[in-house]
Structure formats: structure tokens, C-alpha cells
Image (cartoon, rainbow, N blue to C red):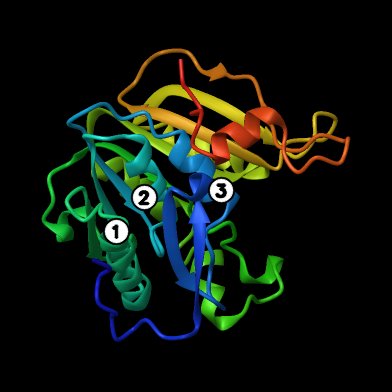
Amino acid sequence: MEPTSHPLLTDSFTEDRLMGGRIVLRQAQDGYRAGMDAALLAAACDAGIGARVLEAGCGAGGALLTAAARRPGVHFTGIERDPAAAALASHNAQLNGLQDRIEIRQGDVRRSFRTLGLEPFDAAMSNPPFFDDPGALRAPAAAKHGAWMAEGGLGVWTSFLLKAVREGGSITIIHRADRLADILALLAPKAGSFQIRPIQPHADAPAKRVLVRALKTGKAPLRLLPALVLHPRDGAKHTPEAEAIFRGEADLPWL
């Protein structure tokens, strides 16, 4: 039986299919919409059976839903400050029959992780807002401001993620490639064992995204992994490797 409609759900949302149609995602028509970055973040989640995983800034649940579909036996908690998005994420979890493994909490990463009253997680993942300087970007639509602008800076997000995981727990972030040095510097005081996977639009083009994985208190040397190339130059929409990931047929593994 389909879950009953939530009062926050109106005609201003769309219903999209993810992972080759396995996941239904209802998301706002005009607000921030989950896309490629959420799919890649979910594919990079390598939590084992019985693990607890947190996503900071889960939005309508695009990454949470696909990560949960990929990882049976893993429990996910999404933190979202926007009440409408949090309600939509809860609705989506129910719609996909994942409500037993996905919990949504309304919360703000600018506040201490301790205020949530949760035990540290085995893993945390996030797609933080890409900009923290309003002067560097033409102002986005009001409905997208919170998803595009990191109020308090990127450091607020990395600090929250570091507090959210136990010692030895993993942190996975997808972000702009030109912020890689900042991400490493912000995580490095308390995390290590970095692995970095560049995401290139084409094989002959610079990476525009990076996936970064770190372990809290990790000490292993940094590893730069082979890049994922998204699009071929022959006119196809995606490379075979990227298509397999987006359809849920392959993961983005770590070493």
C-alpha cells in the first residue's frame, strides 16, 4: 500500500526513478534536486552489514535511498535542517519500503552533534553545499540557497562529520575538485588514511568533482585512486562504468 500523502507534499514535486527504476524519489520541483552527486556518494558508501551510517544534509533522501538499496542490513540516519525536505525524505523512505532502515532527524550541522542525542556512527557521508562565499556566486533561487551555500563555511560540515563518527569510522564526502586541498586540511587534524577518487566529465578533461574518504584517527598514507570518467566523446550519455554505477549494478570501491 502506498503511504498516505503528507501535508507538505503538493503538486510542486516530481517523481523520479533512480537505480534503473528500483528507487522512487519524490523531490521538490523548484528546490534543490538530487542528481549525479547523490548517486556517486551512495555508490561510494561501503558500510558492512550491521553498520550505522549518517548522512549530513540528506535533502529529500536521494543518496540515503540509493545507499540503503545497495547495502541491505545497514541502518541509515539522515540529518536535514529544512522541515519540508526532512518530511519528504521520511515519506520517500516509506514509499520505497525502507522506513525500517532509514531514520530522518531534523537538525542543523551548525549545532553540535551532541545535541542530536545520537551515539557516534560507524560511517558518515555528505555532499556539503559547494559554496561558502556569497560573493563568489550569483545568488541561487531562494529555494536552493541552503543547498548551495554552506553557512558557516565548509569547516562547519567537516567538524560535524568528525564528531559524528567513532574512532576508526569512515567519512565520505563528494565536493568540487578545487576544494580538495581545503577538505584535506580541515579533516587532517583528526582523520587520515585518505583515499581520493577524481570524477572527470571526459577522459581528456580535468576533474570537476572528487570523492574523498578518510578514517577518523587513520594513519595510512594517502592514496589517489583511478578516476571515474562520466561521459565518452562518441555521443553516448555515459561511459559503461558510469552507467553501471547509476543503474546500481556497480559500486565505487575503496582500497
Residue 147 horizontal side relative to residue 55, left or right: right
Secondary structure under tag 3 reads: helix
Q: Amino acid at mark 1?
A: Ala
Marker disc for residue 93? 1
Q: Amino acid at mark 2?
A: Leu
Residue 132, horizontal then vertical, whole percent: 56, 62
Secondary structure under tag 2 reads: helix
Marker disc for residue 9? none
- Asked if one can make out residue 72 in the rendered structure from this viewpoint, the answer is yes
Residue 90, relative to residue 241: is it above or below? below
Residue 220, horizontal then vertical, whole percent: 41, 13
How crowded pointer 3 is (Cα within 10 Å; few <14, some 14-19, many 20+) is rated as many
Q: Nearer the viewer, residue 195 or 23?
A: 23
Q: Which residue is mark 2?
A: 64
Q: Nearer the viewer, residue 134 or 83?
A: 83
Marker disc for residue 37? 3
Secondary structure under tag 1 reads: helix
